[in-house]
Image (spheres, helix red, strand yellow):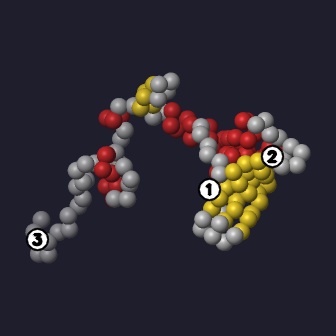
Amino acid sequence: MWVKLDCAYRGEGERVIIYDWKTGKRLTEDTSLQLSCYALYASHRWRADPAAVVAREYNLYHDDEREFPVRPEDLESTLTRMRASFDDMRALLDDVENNVPLLEEQFVRTEDPARCGTCKFLKVCRPEPPETAQPEEPGEET
Ligand code: SF4
């Protein structure tokens, strides 16, 4: 797993302060998860006591700073989510050690073409647009 911190420094005592810069968005659940990942990184990489890690979000647009306590239960749930995500990604690999994906034919396309319209993989997954049901012409006999 890779993380890219905006800013981190050691404070008084054992405190580790981690900043995440924002430019407009307010804190969301996803940001909390992100900050929790940073705290995990600090505890593993710098052997920081998780209880001494302080996660702060600084919103440059609003000149607003928020501080989020890093609770042990948040770290545990973040670890659980990360492990599940790793497992999901590994399940799509043919060779985990060498990061070789399953063959393309092993990925099942959705049966619902409506889902493809906004999919960011559409161009590679379906170079030819999926056929969709055509509306019937008025008066057309079936
Ligand atoms: S285009 Fe996206 S949603 Fe549609 S089958 Fe491919 S991966 Fe699935």
Along the viewing direction, whichever of 121 and 17 lies nearer the viewer: 17
- Measure how far apart labels 2 and 3 are at the Cα level: 75 Å
Under circle 1, the secondary element is helix
Along the viewing direction, whichever of 46 and 92 lies nearer the viewer: 46
Q: Tell me what residue is drawn at x 65 percent, y 48 percent.
A: 5
Crowd rating for badge 2 (residues with CA inside 10 Å; few <14, some 14–19, many 20+): few
Q: Where is mark 3, residue-wise?
A: 140
**Would you say the residues marked 2 and 3 are in contact, meaning their CB atoms lie under 8 Å apart?**
no
Residue at the far bottom: name it: 138
Q: Where is mark 2, residue-wise?
A: 10
Image quarter in which the N terminus is found: top right
Q: Tell me what residue is drawn at x 59 percent, y 40 percent.
A: 2
Asked if residue 110 is positioned above or below residue 83 in the image, the reply reads below
Along the viewing direction, whichever of 93 and 9 lies nearer the viewer: 9
Asked if residue 45 is positioned above or below residue 96 in the image, the reply reads below
Q: Is residue 113 visible to the viewer in this orientation of the structure?
A: yes
The location of residue 95, given as percent across then percent down, is: 45, 25
Crowd rating for badge 3 (residues with CA inside 10 Å; few <14, some 14–19, many 20+): few
Q: Where is mark 1, residue-wise?
A: 30
- Mark 2 vs mark 3, foreground winner is 2
